[in-house]
Image (tube, rainbow, N blue to C red):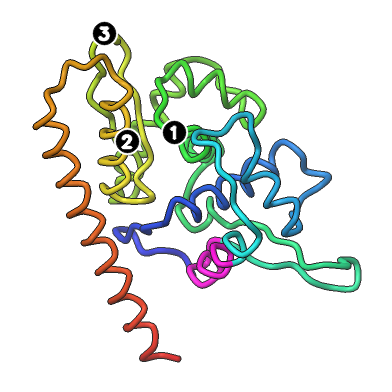
Amino acid sequence: MELNDRSLPVLSAEEVRILGCLVEKELTTPDNYPLTLNSLLAACNQKTSREPVVEFDAATVELGLRSLKERGFVRSVTGAEHRVPKFKHDMPFMLRLNPAQTAVLTVLMLRGPQTVGEIRGRSERVYSFGSLDEVAGALTDLKDLNGRKLVMELERLPGTKEPRFAHLLSGEDAIAIVAVAEIERGSGVFRGEELGALREELQELRNEVATLRAELIEFRKQFD
């Protein structure tokens, strides 16, 4: 079932990685797509073209796949021609994305916040952008796509010239995590109390997301 115009999924970091990998591998290694669980696990834990690098286990991927299937983002493929179950995504259909928008979102999902130039350079195997303006146009679309905000522009870091963009598939909570991580890696221009305040805000956002997920689970139980 396709999402309605204004609904926006709130995906966990694990779900984002799983979904992004399925999209990437369909476009870069089509002969090996759909993916088996083992292939998907290897893609999630890949050491290159990933930020952050993770160490998922099979149970984590299976749990993420189950949740994504319930939301309509992923389908399993079985049959006589498949010795083991395989998995494929339906992200462009669910979010109403064209190829350029899909490429931009995929790069942000797999590599974290990026500048326009970084998106163009790092999406070459997924989609060939003709210019930086084409990337910027896709980002503009994703800021308000059918009433849904899928990406946002981040505040520039001290000493940087180019703005960066982040996906919103995990909600504002994920953006807060990015902000805290960047401050901790930064040049020390932020005072300790400012960092503490951001951490408190981050914890509040995490608590809100956990509450919303619990309410969603209880709501789904009414229809089981």
Number of the front mark, 2 or 1: 2
State which region is magenta. 63-73
Q: CA distance from mark 2 to mark 1?
A: 9 Å
Predominant secondary structure in magenta? helix
- Residue occupying image coordinates x 29% and y 27%: 184
Res. 112 mark: 1
Q: Are marks 2 and 1 in contact (CB under 8 Å)?
A: yes
In the rendered image, residue 182, in percent from the top left (x then y), is placed at 31, 27
Q: How many other residues sit within 10 Å of disc 3, few (<14), some (14-19) or many (≥20)?
A: few
Residue 219 is drawn in which quadrant? bottom left
Residue identifier under label 3: 159
Q: Is residue 27 magenta?
A: no
Tag 2 or tag 3, which sits nearer the N-term?
Answer: 3
Examine the rendered structure and indicate whether residue 97 appears above or below residue 84: above
Q: Residue 163 falls in which quadrant of the image?
A: top left
At label 1, the amino acid type is Gly
- Mark 1: few/some/many CA within 10 Å (<14, 14-19, 20+): some
Read off the residue under disc 2: 178
Mark 3 residue element: loop
Is the residue under label 2 in contact with that under label 3 (CB below 8 Å)? no
Q: Is residue 72 magenta?
A: yes
Up-down: is 152 above or below 222? above
Q: Position of residue 112 (x, y in %)?
A: 44, 33
Residue drawn where x is 72% and y is 59% of the image: 37
